[in-house]
Amino acid sequence: MHLTHLRDLAVDTPLPSGHAFLSAASGMVVCGSALYVVADDAQCLGVFDLGTGEPGRLIPLIAGELPKDAVERKKQKPDFEILLALPCAGATRLLAMGSGSTSQRMRGALIDLPDHNAPASVRLIDLQALFAAIAPLVPEINLEGAVLRCDQLLLFNRGNMEYPASQIIAVPLSALLEGGPITATLHAELQLPTVSGVPLTVTDACLLESGHILLSAVAEATDNSYADGALLGAAIVELDANLNVRVIEPLDPILKVEGLSAQIMADGVHLLCVTDADDPDAASSLYRRVLGARA
């Protein structure tokens, strides 16, 4: 599958890195003509207009700035890997979530974006109870994607070379938002194909109107949830409503897609993706593709 490049994710205000772009896009939501993106090495939300292509604006999610030093930055970053739209009358409500792969990454943010350019409201969420409930179900925590089905969050925990499977875990959304006790259930394990001995593992998920789920997956040569590795392959994966693998379409050229959004239209599934180059000096990019008709 070939993806078409639309734009780099330039922003109108330089980040602490000095760059006026997002460099590690990891989660995305599309609402109308607005594209919302979180990056795993930043503490803000990027907001882009799909209709104009102008630089995006930044909404702070966590006060303060991350260190410029790459090693210290990696230690302290919130690692926002998930961005999800939640039901909300008269406004846009988003949920950003950290991966949980370190104690610094067990935070979330509930973001309300009222109409008419009113200021955004951000409420930080402590996700330690969530990750405590997930820990017994997975060999290593590294949440990378989520979809909402009714009041149930399906969370996608990414594998690696040491633990090749990616897990799908269900938790009640209401319990997560209200801060009460959380019960997590392991729904499925995905054993995706390997590329040169490296397994494809899940980096994001989005729910189609049909009930099917699209996943981005990459084959990254790393044996843990912290270190980056060489990128050997990438694919878009389709699951049916019962979470069975239906289609696996390799990407050519290979791109590290970490966020995706899709909508079923008359001519097929319109797919948008954002990428992470694992290079703080390289801008993340937005890509598109219209897939064939889906059930």
Image (cartoon, rainbow, N blue to C red):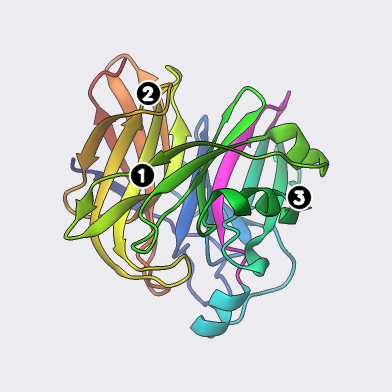
What residue would you read off at disc 1?
216
Q: Which residues are magenta?
A: 77-92
Counting residues from the start of the chain, the first of labels 3 and 2 encountered is 3
- Can residue 35 be seen in this snapshot? no
Which disc number belongs to residue 122?
3
Quadrant in which the N terminus appears:
top left
- Please say if the residues under marks 3 and 2 sit with CB atoms less than 8 Å apart: no
What residue would you read off at disc 2?
240
Label 3 to label 2: alpha-carbon separation = 34 Å
Label 3 to label 1: alpha-carbon separation = 28 Å
Depth check: 92 or 140 in front?
140
Q: Position of residue 228 (x, y in %)?
A: 38, 70
The amino acid pointed to by label 3 is Val
47 sits to left or right of 92: left
Label 2 to label 1: alpha-carbon separation = 15 Å
Residue 221 inside the magenta-drawn segment? no
- Please say if the residues under marks 2 and 1 sit with CB atoms less than 8 Å apart: no
Q: How many residues crowd around disc 3 within 10 Å: few (fewer than 14), some, or many (20 or more)?
A: some
Q: Position of residue 168 (x, y in %)?
A: 49, 39
Q: How many residues crowd around disc 2 within 10 Å: few (fewer than 14), some, or many (20 or more)?
A: some
Counting residues from the start of the chain, the first of labels 2 and 1 encountered is 1
Residue 278: name its quadrant: bottom left
Classify 197 as above or below 6.
below
Residue 86 inside the magenta-drawn segment? yes
